[in-house]
Structure formats: C-alpha cells, structure tokens
Image (tube, rainbow, N blue to C red):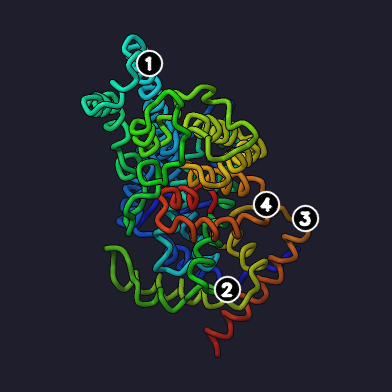
Amino acid sequence: MIEELGPEARALLDAARDGLSPDAEAVRRVRAKVHLAAGGQAVGSAIVAKLGVIALVVAVAAGVGVYATRRATPALAPAVELASPPEAPRQAAMHEPAAPARAPSDDELITIDPPGPRAGGPAIASGPAPAVAPRAALPASRAAETTARSSVAGGDEPGAGAGPPGGAPRGIDLAREVELVDAAMAALRAGDASGALRAVQRHATETAGRGQLAEDAAAIEIEALCHLHDPTTNAKLEAFDARYPRSAQRSRLDNQCP
Amino acid sequence: MVTPTRQMPSLALAAAHPAQDGDVPVFDEVYALHVAFVWRVLRTFGVPEVQVEDAVQDVFVVVHRRLREWQGKAAITTWLFAIARRVASNHRRRAGKPTEPLADELVSDTTGGGDPFVEASRAQAAATVLAILEQLDEDKRIVFALVELEQLPVPEVARMLDLNLNTAYSRLRLARQAFEAAVRAKVRP
C-alpha cells in the first residue's frame, strides 16, 4: 500500500494545479494562434503548392517548347532567321507565360510561418539555375538565352523526367526534381519514411546536392529521419539551419518533428 | 480563470479515451479539454513560464495537423503527453537550459482576472510545488505530477511512460515521501 499524501500536501497541490493552469485569456489566445498557424495546413502543403507551381511551369514550358518547335519547323530552312534580331522579341514572348507562374514567392506560398525575420527561402526563383545543354539546333544566342533562364527550359529536353544519363548532375531538369521530391513527400505522407529517404537520396545523387529543390528535399529527409528516430536527425537539422538559415521549412520541421 | 480541465482533469482525460473507429475528435474539443493538461505538463517538464505559451501552441499545431492520424489506439492524453514531451525537450534545447522548472517566475505572474488574493495564493502554491519538484529527479517528478497534479490512474501513467507498473508505483511512493517531507519542512520549518 502506498502512503498517501497528507492534507497539507494535498491542499498545496490543489492550489498549485490552478496556479499552473492557463487563464482563460491565454487559452483563447493560444487557440487563435493555433488556428492561424494551422489554418490552411499551409506549411504542410507548402512543398506541394510549390511543386504544383513548378509542375505548372514545367507544363507551360513544355507546351511552349512544343508550340515553338511546330511553329519554327517550316521556317527553319534559313537558320539565320532564327538567330536574327527580330527573333528575340518572339523568344521573349514565347517564354512570357512562364514568368508569372514563377512569380509566387515563398511568402505567398507559405502562410504558416510564425512571425520572424525571413526574406523568402532560397527557393525556385532565387536558386542557381543549373546549366542546361543547349539544343544543337538552336543558334548560340538562343542557346545562351535558354541557359540563362532556369532549367525549366529543360522540360522540353528529350528524355525529360528520365534523369541524367550516367548520373551527370548538370543535366537534371526540374521535372525530374519535382518527380523525386514529390515521390519523397508522398512516401512521407503515407508513413513510409524509409521510402521518403530513398527518394531524397536519389534526388541528392542525381542533382549532386545542388538541385533547385534541395532545400525541400533536405526538409523531407529530416522529417523522415525524425519519424525513424534516427540519431543523426539533430545533426542534419543543424546542417539544415546552417545552409538555409531563413528557410520557410524550418517551422514545419519544428512542428512535425519537435 | 476556469478552464474545462481545471477542476476535474482526470475525468476530462478519461472521457477522451480511445475513440471508436472512424470517430475523429474535433480539434476544438480536444483543445478545450486538454489545453490545461498540456500546459501543466510542459511546466512540469521544465518549460519556463515565459515560453510555455509558445510551447503549448507548438503542441496543438502538431495536434491540429495530426489529429486525423490519431486512431484511438491509445488514450489521447498519452498521445498529447508524447507530443508535449518532445516539444518541451525542443524548447529546453533551444533555450539551452536545464530541465528544472523555474519556480520563481510564477510568484510575480498572477494571471487571470479573478480575485487577486486568490490568484496570488495559487501562484505561490504553484511556485512552491515547482520548487519542490525541482528537487526530484525527472523520472519521479513526472510520475508524481501525472498522478497527483493530473489525477491520472497509475496504470495509465505507467502506459504513458512505458513503465512497468511496479516501477511506476515505486517512483510514486518515493516522490510522495519526498514531497510530503518538503511540505512539512516548509509549513513547520
């Protein structure tokens, strides 16, 4: 039989229970904050939203590429014509639709982040554009322009989505990145943390860790490791913080893997 | 200053025991029933008063996201406790502080709009209890707090902490002895 507490101790605990509890105002305040933070499931879906935008961009770019190819074919005979100055505005016009799709910043996509210093993560628009090998048929000026734009243009590359041959990271296109990160996120959502890690690892391998979605992949990796109670989680988190100090994913990681 | 779980935490917690198949609890109900429990657990785990509101928010953001994933295989308090424990650990790690609660903060923080004397008395009692609990190691402190503050049955606490039932009772017995002695020393120094 366990010795019970005396009346004084019991009275003290009863009073302390009230003293340790939140007041009604704090209860309301926190509830409002939680609803605000979780309102649109925004952080959880931030990557999905981002991927959606990227997929849209890729689709638009691919469509533009097809359209451009079809339109250009009859006029290809004089190759010089493509490289001539009048072509430049047409080029710009062809790529124009992609621009608005890339416009949304992280701030627009991610609404759950708590207030704090954040100037938008190093996401799609600001990430370094991987070099994309210009198509041989393109004149130098157009190739340069294509390269200068993001790898979105790679969406109309032959073999897009199949990954770089021989594992060469320079050629990976955004569609492939989207595919891999999407697969990782889907696995994570399905509770398959190991599958998520495999997809993330593949992304890292194919992009040599320099993909445009490296930040997203790293966040998924940390969340997966956390689910698996992997002892390297904290080290990964520290590395993530060092690499992406203002990441929009950070609060999601805190929430998903406190 | 009265919250749903304030008066009868154990009843509220028991009421939320395993849900039926497909019976997903409503977030606002879970919040209303268990916010005080989560709040106190975080304090017991050593989250400073100044951080506890943020920590509670963190817990319930997780709850909000994962409520559909909670399938009623365990009491919701067990689930909430596990989340709160991780959040508390995270907050302590960020703060770089030891695990002990900071009892001194409470004395000056008489929250609520009730009778100021009553509020001050409660805050003083809370500070005293936290000061005593600081003297216990965390294993005993948590068992004691869940049984004596949250009024949970010992078998449920043992399940929560994944403890052998005898171990839970043993820790409770030792914690009660220490607590009783500390109270006597304070009341009759």
Q: Nearer the viewer, residue B91 or B160?
A: B91
Residue B12 visible from this viewpoint: no
Instruction: Measure the C-alpha gap from mark 2 to mark 3.
Output: 22 Å
* Distance between mark 2 and mark 1 Cα atoms: 75 Å
In the picture, residue A119 is in which quadrant?
bottom left
Identify the residue position indicated by label 3 in the image.
Answer: B164
Is label 1 in a helix, a strand or a loop?
A: helix
Q: Are marks 1 and 4 in contact (CB under 8 Å)?
A: no
Of B115 and A80, which appears nearest the observer?
A80
Circle 3 residues within 10 Å: few <14, some 14–19, many ≥20: few
Left or right of A169, for residue A132: left
Please tell me which residue is depicted at 56% across the width and 40% down the height of the picture: A169
Q: Amino acid at mark 4?
A: Asp
Kindly give the residue lying farthest to the top in the view shown.
A74
Residue type, label 2: Leu
Q: Is residue B53 above or below residue B25?
A: below
Q: Chain of mark 2?
A: B
Residue at numbered disc 4: A230
Q: Which residue is mark 2?
A: B133
Question: In the image, is A156 to the left or to the right of B15?
Answer: left
Instruction: Kindly indicate whether the residues beneath marks 2 and 3 are on one polypeptide chain.
Output: yes
Whether labels 1 and 4 belong to a single chain: the reply is yes
Q: In the image, which is nearer the foreground, mark 2 or mark 1?
A: 1
Q: Which mark is residue A69?
A: 1
Kindly identify which numbered label has been placed on residue B174: none
Sequence-first disc among 2 and 3: 2
State yes or no: discs 2 and 1 in contact (Cβ < 8 Å): no
Chain of the residue under the numbered disc 3 shown in the image: B
User: Which kind of residue does numbered mark 1 sit on?
Assistant: Thr
